Image: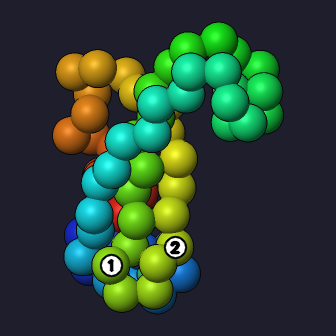
Amino acid sequence: MDADDRGCPKCGSTETDVGTISTTGGGLSKMFDIQTNSFRVVSCVDCGYSELYRDAGSRGSDIVDVFLG
Ligand SMILES: [Zn+2]
């Protein structure tokens, strides 16, 4: 894929914000059928589109690249 095609899947923006969700037995953990885990959330700053990634530790910085394609 050409570098110029990178960006938000919805609007094409490359402005992202990364947050973290920790699940400790609430609704999310039931939804994903897990006990306790953390997830990274990459959100497009422009349109708000977000993708959820299971926290992979050292690969944390890579999820923005995954999001942007
Ligand atoms: Zn967007």
Who's the residue at 56% across and 21% down the image? 24
Say above or below: 51 vs 53. below
Residue 67, image x and y in percent? 41, 57
Q: Nearer the viewer, residue 2 or 44?
A: 44
Determine the quadrant in which ligand 1 lies: bottom left
Is residue 1 visible from the viewing direction of this image? no
Mark sitting on residue 45: 1
Question: Disc 2 designates what residue?
Answer: 49
Residue 57 horizontal/vertical position (percent) = 29, 20
Residue 50, compared with residue 12, is above or below; it is above
Q: Secondary structure at mark 1?
A: loop
**Quarter of the image holding residue 34?**
top right
Q: Kindly check if marks 1 and 2 are in contact, taking CB atoms under 8 A apart as contact.
A: no
Q: Secondary structure at mark 2?
A: loop
Residue 59, given in percent of the width and then of the height, sits at 27, 27
Is the residue indicated by label 2 positioned so its CB lies within 8 Å of ligand 1? yes
- Asked if residue 34 shows in the view, the reply is yes
Write the residue at 54% across / 81% down. Answer: 10
**Residue drawn at x 37%, y 22% as measured from the top left:** 56
- Kind of residue sitting beneath label 1: Val
